[in-house]
Amino acid sequence: MRPLLFVVFISLLMCVFTHGKKGNVLVLIGDDAGFETAIYNNSVCQTPGLNYLARRSIIFENAFTSVSSCSPSRSAILSGLPQHQNGMYGLHNTVHHFNSFTELKSLPLILQKAGIKTGIVGKKNVGPEAVYPFDFEVTEEQMSINQIARNITLMKDKASEFLSKIKSE
Ligand SMILES: *[C@@H]1O[C@H](CO)[C@@H](O)[C@H](O)[C@H]1NC(C)=O
Ligand SMILES: *[C@@H]1O[C@H](CO)[C@@H](O)[C@H](O)[C@H]1NC(C)=O
């Protein structure tokens, strides 16, 4: 249960940045990240950046996922629908090549239609691309998963890049 809870915690890191009238949305998804943060009362790992974000956020202490699997759980985060409604029954990558239904109205699509800038940093690995378009993407499709989804320093840098980009637009 705990790793699954974390998936939902991470989804709450969908931060709404209000540089414009409408705000902007950045999704940060770590890969194989657990509860090793001070936010979840871990006393060993020092996570000042996440703590700062958490102080201005809602922390979910109880949350559920519709499936304990990689791409399907992220498709639920990004669509608000369980797998039998969004089509992502299995893993998206390599030989698995599962995809969501082409007519799915995902979160990034709905936000894009509303003129809200969207970014995703970390693990994405859902498809098809046209169903999950973000204005700013730095994901494991572009670089090693050990860097973008498991290197919190790099994720922080890319989150800053997103913020600078939308600020200058
Ligand atoms: C962390 O510990 C505090 C104090 O015991 C508690 O109120 C809080 O619910 C805990 N947070 C989580 C996420 O478990
Ligand atoms: C994580 O990313 C930072 C920033 O790009 C880099 O300096 C660092 O070497 C990376 N850490 C690892 C373990 O690769």
Image (cartoon, helix red, strand yellow):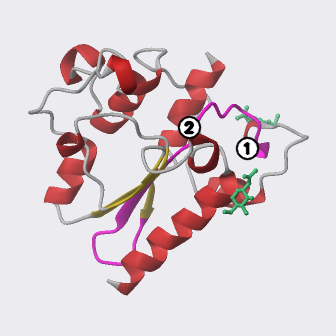
* Residue 57 versus residue 117 in the image, above or below: above
> In the displayed image of the protein, which residue is found farthest to the right?
44
Seen at 51% across and 50% down, the residue is 143
CA–CA distance between discs 1 and 2? 10 Å
Type of the residue with mark 1: Ile
First in sequence, mark 1 or 2: give its number. 2
Q: Where's residue 50, x and y in %?
A: 68, 54
Element assignment for label 1: helix
Residue 34 part of the magenta segment: yes
Q: Where's residue 91, x and y in %?
A: 38, 20
Seen at 52% across and 25% down, the residue is 63
Type of the residue with mark 2: Phe
Between 149 and 163, the one nearer to me in the picture: 149
For the record, the magenta segment spans: 17-39
Image quadrant of ligand 2 equals bottom right
Element assignment for label 2: helix
Seen at 51% across and 33% down, the residue is 8
The disc placed on residue 9 is 2
* Residue 121 versus residue 89 in the image, above or below: below
> In the displayed image of the protein, which residue is found farthest to the front?
95
* Mark 1 and mark 2 residues within 8 Å of each other at the beta carbon: yes
The disc placed on residue 39 is 1
Residue 169 part of the magenta segment: no
